[in-house]
Image (cartoon, rainbow, N blue to C red):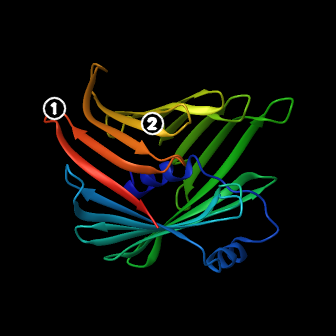
Amino acid sequence: MRCFFYKTIFLIVLIGCSESSKNNSELIKQIDSIKEKTIIYEYEVDSIGRIMDTLSVEKIKKNDNDVVILSDKLIFTDYGYLKIKKYFRDNKNLFYSISESSEIGILSIIEFWDKNEDIIKGISLDFRDNKVKDTIKMTYKYTHDDNGLKTKLIIQNKYSDEDVIASKTEITFNDLEEIVAETTLLYGDTISVSKFSFSRNLLRKKTIKDYKNNVLIRFNYDKKGYVSSRETYNLTSSDSLIKISDVSYTVDELGRIKNRVQTQLPSRIKRYFLYKYD
């Protein structure tokens, strides 16, 4: 199996694009021309809030409706940096993404095309040594109810040099077109199952069973739909759960993360993180 392809699945499962009179290149130029931006700094701090390290710097741009249309994130690593740049349409849906590292150069480019606000196809280019080494073609098939609302989406992904479908993702929607379940198979094997719980149109819980890494992750959200905590468990062969980490979040009135505390178990070693917005 190809590691890059597995990572790509999670990037593309919950994203799409909406139809626009402008093509992707024109939209990128339009977004790039916008000067107003917000910069988000992510720091690791000690228990009393003193900055120890800068982990990432993210530049975001928003449209007039306060929707993020650009995320340009620089992540610092032990070996340099990783840069991930994402362009979104006015309906919050991603249509173009490029990632690169300081050591390797371009890692991937992902692009989507759609019709009538539904994505119909996409392509992911995997680079090695600044050359395209793998091409993944993505196709989308929707099922609608009698009122025209989406009930199911099946995404199939295939390498250009293979005849078989490399992965298949099935997404189920409720009567408000909110995602309630998602299952991904890689070469016929189930690698992840996710479930989403809503209350009063707000996400309250998200559970991800990641069989490849043998973990279960639970996200909890507060009454406003803002993330409040994350729990990670090891899945043993008997399917029992052993908690390996806890993360708690503090958010501001806009739902932006202000602080994050990560507790590793069973050692109970804590790491503290601070976010600043300029």
Q: Which residue is mark 1?
A: 266
> What's the mark number on residue 71?
none
Between residue 76 and residue 14, name the one nearer to us. 76
Comparing marks 2 and 1, which lies closer to the viewer? 1
| Residue at (45% x, 45% y) in the render | 251
Residue 113 relative to residue 115: left or right: left
Return the x and y of residue 74 as percentages of the image width and height.
40, 69
Give the amino acid type for the residue marked by disc 2 in the picture: Ser
Say which element carries label 1.
Answer: loop
Q: Which residue is mark 2?
A: 192
Return the x and y of residue 92 as percentages of the image width and height.
65, 55
Crowding at dot 2, Cα within 10 Å, few <14 / some 14-19 / many 20+, comes out as: many
Between residue 105 and residue 42, name the one nearer to us. 42
Say which element carries label 2.
Answer: strand
| Residue at (86% x, 31% y) in the render | 147
| Residue at (84% x, 36% y) in the render | 148
Return the x and y of residue 171 as percentages of the image width and height.
61, 36
Residue 202 relative to residue 209: left or right: right
Find out whether the residues at labels 2 and 1 contact each other: C-beta distance under 8 Å: no
| Residue at (65% x, 55% y) in the render | 93
Up the image or down, 114 lies above or below 249; here it is: below
Give the amino acid type for the residue marked by disc 1 in the picture: Pro
For residue 180, say whether it is visible.
no
Spatial CA distance of label 2 from label 1 is 25 Å
